[in-house]
Image: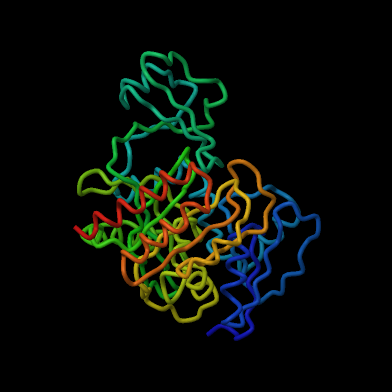
Amino acid sequence: MANANHQVWVLGAGQLGAMMRHAGMPLAIEVYPVPLDSDTIPAVPPNAVVTPEIEHWPQTPANQALANHPNFMNAHVFDRLADRLTQKQLIDHLNLATAPWCNVTTESTADNLFALLGDRVLLKRRRGGYDGRGQHWLKQPHATTIPDAWIGEGIAEAAIDFNEELSLVGVRDRNGQHYFYPLTLNLHTDGILTASLAPLARLTPLQAQAECMLGALLDELDYIGVMAMECFRVGDKLLINELAPRVHNSGHWTQAGTACSQFESHLRAVTGLPLAPPKTRGLTAMVNLVGIDRNNQWLAIPEAALYWYGKEVRPGRKVGHINLCGTDPEQVSKALEDLKPLLPEHYDAIIQWAQTQIAAGRQ
C-alpha cells in the first residue's frame, strides 16, 4: 500500500503533468512535474515514483536523472513504444490488427512501397511527430521518390479507408488487474484531435474487441498505469493505429464524465493504490481549444467544465479543453449549441459533427 503522502515526479511539465497534479490532490499524492528543458537535476527521494507525460524526451542531465530513478515506472516500455517500428513489431507479434506497413530502409523505393501497400502510402517518423506532424504522403502518380530524410527514419503504412476513429483508455495495476473506460469516438482536424464523445451506445458491441486488444498489450508489456490505444473502425473490425503509454488527450472527457478520471487512475496504479472501475456520469462531449483566446463566457454554460492550460496562445497549439457532460444526450447537444457562438466560426463544423453523432445515437 502506498504512503498517503506518496510523491510522484513527472518527466515533463505540460498540461498532462498539470492535470496529474490536480488529480493527486484529493488523494494526498504530491505530484511534481519537471520541465523537459530543466537545467536543475531534481532531488527525487528514493521512495518516490517517476512517470512521464510523453514517450520521448531530450537527453539532458535532469531528464536522465528522472529516467534512471529506480522507481521510474514502465522504464522498459518507452523505447519500445516511442519507436513506431518496434511498436508495430509488438502489435504484429501479438497478432493484433493494424494497417499493412513496412520499414523504410535504404533498399526502399516509392515503386516497391506502392506495390506492397497500394496507391496511397503514409510515411511516419519512427520517433516524435504528433498532432499531424511527422507525416508525409506518397500518392500515385505524383510521387516517384522517397524523400532522403525518411530513409532509415520512418515506417510506411497503407492508407486505410476507415469509417471513424476511436480510442480506448485502459489502466493496469501491479497485480495485473485491468479496467477500461468506454470506447471514445474522436474527430481530428488537420491531424489534431478536436472533439471526443463518450460513451456512445452504438460503440458498445466493439468494446470487448477493443479491451481484448489493449489488454493483451498491457499484459505483454507488464505495464502499470494508463495507456491509450487509437484505432480505426473498418466495418465491425478495429485496426490499431498508435499506442500512447501515458494519459491521453482522447481521455480528457473522463475528468467530467466519470467518477475516477484517467489521471486519477494512473496515479492510483503507479502508487499502488486500489483501482476503481470507471463509472460514467452520462454522455460527455470534449471540445479541444486549439490556438484560440480564452473566453470566460464559456463558464456560463451550466454543463461546461473548462480546463485552461495557461499556455501562450499560438496557432495550432492546444491551450485548453471544455467538457460538456449531461445525463440526457439532448442536454449535451443543447450545451454544444450554446457553446457554438462563443467559439471561432471554424468550430461550427466540429460542433455540428458532435451534435450529429449524438442525434444518431437517439434514433
Q: Nearer the viewer, residue 172 or 93?
A: 172
Q: Residue furthest right?
A: 40
Q: Residue at x 28, y 46 (%)?
A: 233
Residue 49: percent from left, percent from top: 61, 71
Q: Quadrant of residue 296?
A: bottom right
Q: Quadrant of residue 164?
A: top left
Q: Nearer the viewer, residue 50 or 24?
A: 24
Residue 61: percent from left, percent from top: 76, 54
Q: Residue at x 59, y 76 (%)?
A: 24
**Does 339 sit above or below residue 140?**
below
Residue 101: percent from left, percent from top: 36, 34
286 left or right of 18 in image: left
Q: Is residue 225 visible?
A: no
Q: Quadrant of the C terminus?
A: bottom left
Residue 323: percent from left, percent from top: 47, 63
Q: Is residue 100 visible?
A: yes
Q: Residue at x 34, y 21 (%)?
A: 114
Q: Quadrant of residue 218?
A: bottom left
**Does 308 sit above or below residue 59?**
below
Q: Nearer the viewer, residue 271 or 47?
A: 271
Q: Nearer the viewer, residue 44 or 318?
A: 318
Q: Residue at x 50, y 38 (%)?
A: 132
